[in-house]
Image (tube, helix red, strand yellow):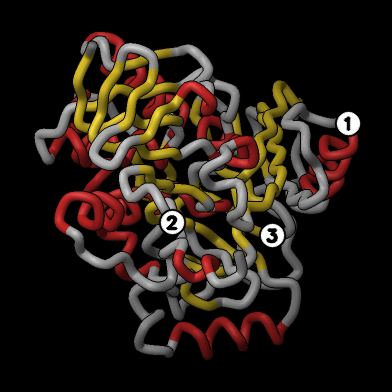
């Protein structure tokens, strides 16, 4: 029998952040990941503190951003690789009213560090009838490279199990859990939309939001920044760019679709005025929650069975903070923020 402090089920950004935090705490763990959920891998990776539709600060972004930047930079030092890059985001305005709303937002104390009050009037090869506003404190994270690096690391440590986790094989006692040949003090589920099949937490209101992206190549575009209009576009290097994303709350399958491809091409054609070629398409199911806050905490009856899920499209920014909150709760009985605790939904069940 192998004895561990924790079993982690799922290795998206949530599972990775938890594994890193547990290692910092000196805790042993085994990770189960069968690559059936890959929203983190295909995510746009843009870490943007601003809701660009309304020019407002994303939920607690001013607190989460420093934690996230430090987290990714720490992993860069650990693996001697580059995962995070600071990059300005330029929001293309569609009216004079939007420009005026931007000025008003940039004057608010909480937004001054994020929104530039100086407008940009032209970006090469980007169509624009009005100006652009710059989000100064934004980053892009290469999530695929990061996950691949961490998976290799876990394999070297013999801490990764690539078989599908079967919930019916889990035995839960008061002070430990058993799964096959592993005995652990606790288990944390971070399965993304796979949580719908989890008998311990399938009562939680986890939704799906399918996002699709295009990968394009253009030697003429020469874009060194991210631009947001009806779609996002940012550079991947070597004249390739990621374009996205779609949002589909009704889809249940993660495969790319022709409809989404046509939708993104139509929006892209309205944004850029140079030749390009579509060289790839990606899709994933984002785990979402009705109040747009994560789901963290313990099972109502089994306090050693925990969940960390529901990050939606901002997982790249939220996951590092969420990992800290959950491990503080698990190891030191520090109460979770009310906004993220699963207790906010317990009365409904």
Q: Is residue 282 above or below residue 87?
A: above
Left-right relation of 274 to 16: right
Which quadrant of the structure image shows residue 52? bottom right
> Residue 228 versus residue 238: which sits nearer the camera?
228
Q: Quadrant of residue 67?
A: bottom left
Is 75 rendered above or below residue 32?
below
Give x and y (percent) for residue 205: 63, 57
Secondary structure state at the residue bearing disc 3: loop
Left or right, 68 with respect to 242, comes to left
Camera-side mark, 2 or 3: 2
Asked which secondary structure carries label 2, the reply is loop
Residue position for label 1: 258
**Do callouts 2 and 3 mark residues in contact (Cβ within 8 Å)?**
no
Q: CA distance from mark 2 to mark 1?
A: 43 Å
Answer few, some or many: residues within 10 Å of disc 3's Cα (few below 14, many 20 plus, some between 14 and 19): some
Tell me the mark number nearer the camera, choosing from 2 and 1: 2
Q: Residues within 10 Å of mark 2 (few under 14, many from 20)?
A: few
Q: Position of residue 133 (x, y in %)?
A: 54, 70
Residue 102 percent location from the top left of the image: 56, 81
Q: Residue at x 77, y 32 (%)?
A: 253
Q: Report the residue at 57% width, 52% height from top.
A: 312
Q: Which mark is residue 229?
A: 3
Q: Taking the image as drawn, is residue 68 in sight?
A: no
Q: Which residue is mark 2?
A: 300
Which quadrant of the figure contains the C terminus?
bottom right
């Amino acid at each position: 029998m192998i004895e561990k402090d924790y079993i982690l089920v799922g290795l998206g950004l949530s599972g990775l952040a938890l594994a890193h935090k547990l290692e910092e705490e000196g805790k042993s763990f085994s990770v189960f990941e069968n690559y059936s959920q890959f929203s983190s891998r295909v995510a746009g990776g843009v870490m943007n503190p601003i809701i660009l539709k309304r020019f407002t600060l994303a939920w607690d972004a001013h607190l989460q951003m420093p934690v996230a930047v430090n987290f990714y930079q720490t992993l860069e030092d650990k693996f001697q690789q580059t995962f995070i890059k600071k990059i300005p985001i330029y929001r293309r305005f569609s009216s004079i009213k939007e420009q005026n709303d931007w000025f008003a937002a940039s004057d608010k104390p909480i937004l001054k560090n994020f929104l530039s009050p100086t407008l940009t009037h032209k970006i090469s090869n980007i169509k624009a009838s009005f100006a652009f506003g710059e989000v100064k404190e934004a980053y892009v994270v290469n999530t695929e490279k990061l996950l691949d690096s961490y998976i290799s690391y876990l394999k070297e440590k013999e801490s990764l199990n690539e078989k599908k986790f079967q919930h019916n094989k889990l035995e839960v006692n008061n002070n430990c859990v058993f799964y096959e040949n592993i005995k652990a003090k606790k288990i944390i589920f971070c399965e993304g939309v796979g949580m719908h099949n989890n008998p311990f937490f399938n009562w939680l209101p986890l939704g799906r939001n399918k996002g699709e992206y295009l990968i394009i190549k253009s030697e003429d575009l020469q874009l060194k920044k991210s631009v947001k209009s009806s779609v996002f576009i940012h550079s991947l290097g070597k004249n390739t760019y990621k374009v996205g994303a779609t949002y589909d709350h009704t889809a249940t399958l993660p495969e790319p679709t022709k409809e989404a491809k046509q939708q993104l091409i139509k929006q892209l054609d309205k944004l850029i005025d140079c030749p390009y070629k579509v060289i790839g398409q990606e899709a994933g199911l984002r785990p979402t929650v009705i109040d747009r806050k994560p789901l963290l905490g313990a099972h109502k009856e089994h306090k050693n069975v925990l969940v960390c899920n529901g990050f939606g499209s901002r997982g790249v920014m939220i996951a590092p903070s969420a990992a800290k909150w959950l491990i503080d709760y698990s190891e030191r009985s520090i109460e979770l923020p009310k906004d993220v605790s699963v207790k906010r939904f317990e009365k409904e069940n």
